[in-house]
Image (cartoon, rainbow, N blue to C red):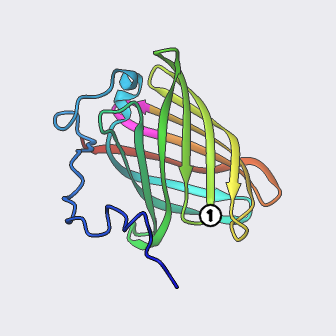
Amino acid sequence: MVTDNPLGPPPWLNAPPVDPYPYEETHDLRKGPDLHPALLGLLPYIGLWRGRGRGGFPTVEDFDYAQEIRISHDGRPFLHYESRAWLLDEQSQPVRPAGREVGWWRPVFDGDRPTDDLEVLISTPTGIVELYLGKITGTQVELVTDAVLRTSTAKEVTAGHRLFGIVEGALLYAQEMAAVGYPLSPHLSARLIRVGG
């Protein structure tokens, strides 16, 4: 004979619906939660950025692309990073969606004091997760991979190097990648202007 579960049903089984997520995340420092003091060194990066760049690699022809990057916070000591790009033709018209990334930029603490060191996690829908270690120097951020994880079907990426900077109010970056048997090689570079925040 089967007996009833003595623990009963879980408490959430018949609970009422949940309201939408109640905490605000923002790329606009004029609204939303206060910026965590540990993020003051990254303050120039917070915003919505849009612009264009040029890409290539030894295994592909050079290409032009447009990109939008959103760097936001929710009051805690990390930044949310989201990037989406699309290929452009010779007339700067969209061709198709290109790379997407999401991740987190986290200052490293020494006790309860933030340092100029960063830990950055970035993942792609193509099955790659990169762990970067980096440093903030003024308005420049330099990141070098500490580890690259990939699914069994992902492209063989083994290392990366990224350099970000705020130059005359614009977000500039250059990215190198080691992949498919090639050492670190130039891959992407772009200039984005602030369109929000």
Decide if residue 89 is in sight here.
no
Q: Is residue 125 above or below residue 194?
A: below
In which quarter of the view is residue 55 placed?
Answer: bottom right
Q: In the rendered view of the protein, which quadrant contains the C terminus?
A: top left
Q: Is residue 58 above or below residue 175?
A: below
Q: What residue appears at the point 60 percent right and 45 percent down from the top-left corner?
A: 175
Residue neighbourhood size for the residue with mark 1, other residues' Cα within 10 Å, grouped as few (<14), some (14–19), many (≥20): few
Task: State the residue lying farthest toward the front.
Answer: 1
Q: Is residue 175 left or right of residue 22?
A: right
Q: Amino acid at mark 1?
A: Gly
**Towards the viewer: 160 or 173:** 160
Query: Mark 1 sits on what residue?
Result: 127
Pinpoint residue 11: horizontal percent, then vertical percent.
32, 61
- Magenta: predominant secondary structure element? strand
Q: Is residue 128 left or right of residue 14?
A: right
Q: Secondary structure at mark 1?
A: loop
Q: What residue appears at the point 40 percent right and 30 percent down from the top-left corner?
A: 77
Q: Where does the magenta region start and end?
A: 166-172
In which quarter of the view is residue 131 placed?
Answer: top right
Pinpoint residue 39: horizontal percent, then vertical percent.
38, 26
Pinpoint residue 74: horizontal percent, then vertical percent.
30, 39
